[in-house]
Image (cartoon, coloured by chain):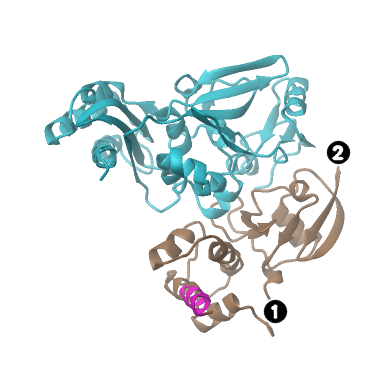
Amino acid sequence: MKKMCDIAVTVNGTIYEATVEPRLLLADFLRHTLGLTGTHVGCEHGVCGACTVLVDGDSARSCLMLAVQVNGRSVETVESLGSIGQMNALQESFHAHHALQCGFCTPGMLMTATDLLRKYPLATDDDIRKGLSGNLCRCTGYEHIVKAIRAVVKAGEKQ
Amino acid sequence: MKPPVFDYMVATDCDTAVAALARAGGEAKILAGGQSLMPMLNFRLLRPSILVDINRIPGFIQETPDSVRIGALTRHFQLETSPVIARHFPVLSCAVAHVGHLAIRNRGTIGGSLSHADPAAELPMMAVLLDATLRIVSSTGSRTVAARDFFLDTMTVALDGTELLTEVVLPKLLAQTGWGFEEVVRRHGDFALAAAAATLTLSGSKIVQARIALTGVGPSPLRATEAESLLVGRGLDENLGRRAIEAVREAISPETDLHASAELRRHLAGVLTGRALVAAWRRGRGG
């Protein structure tokens, strides 16, 4: 048994303290220790993007980070975006454009899109597709996801 | 798909990190961006006794009169968006935008990418293209090594288990230097099936310095020195471009794998070199 580590992490604005094994993945910490099952685990080796969260505001794959690494840091998961009764603009747009079928990739898509919208102008659909290239979806063919994000970009331009 | 057990420590400076590496006697692994190390741990391809997390050592991009110094912990996204890099090494700004996806570029570091040395990665190729000098420290001292002497084989570099790459120094390009970067991937953000990059320094309509680097076509990134010497003293035209492409194809020995045949990679290396040279020539001419 290796030495356990004490961590204090802000997740979606709430500070959590926990004692964890060094090898505990951030994804498993969020899901199993905190019960935040919105973050989905697909490939567990940084290929599918389903487990994408924001760490100090930047998107990161939570299967490629350890829980101990976020000690003192701030993590945002899909639960921070909104609720079923009160979705944020991006979630509304996914809903309006049928940008999901089974929904497994959706939390990762939403968190990736959140970071993309902050960092890039996303002037063309090609830019959006390149931005989403690290997130796999096996249902939609991506078309409606691109449309949903395009609509949010357009709404932002009008403001 | 869960990592094996290991101990973990945070090093907030390089001295602490290399002291830990020395204590572990080669059994430790440095955790930087973790975008290659973590998958290898999840697959249990590695079983380090301890992970030394250096993420709290800040990256930096610092301009000096004749070079730009880049701290090992500088994230790909920092390079991608740095005005200093865009001004002095636009070829690097372009190449780093092709590294992985945003979530990877947010975390991945230049020191990690160079130390990991994937045979199809973009940043090792940039280090070789731009004649980078790498600063390496251990608990017993420090040394520098040229990027061209650093990449020894597939995922094998001139670092022993107790050394840490701390800084990448890029000498500034000469005036009237054009550049080109070309890559073929199945999907944006994947490792290159093949990629080529070039810089051409011109004096009037003659090339006075030529650099061509390739990745994805062998165990390590390489410079096409024979093709480079063909170009020096001449102006780029179709015939010269063709000869340079032939020289590149002769200089490489790509492998066949799941993603592409050796034959396709050799073909691509030539085509991409040709395109990179044309782009470098056009930019060097001010076009």
Q: Spot the cyan chain and give its letter.
A: B
Q: Position of residue B11 (x, y in %)?
A: 76, 34
At label 1, the amino acid type is Ser
In-front residue for pair B31/B109: B109
The quarter of the picture where residue B261 lies is: top left
In-front residue for pair B88/A123: B88
**From what the image shows, is residue B169 above or below residue A104?**
above
Q: Position of residue B260 (x, y in %)?
A: 33, 42
In magenta, the rendered stretch is A150-158
Chain A's colour is brown
Residue B219 visible here:
no
In-front residue for pair A76/B166: B166
Q: Which residue is mark 1?
A: A83
At label 2, the amino acid type is Lys
The quarter of the picture where residue B125 lies is: top left
Q: Which residue is mark 2?
A: A3
Label drawn at residue B176? none
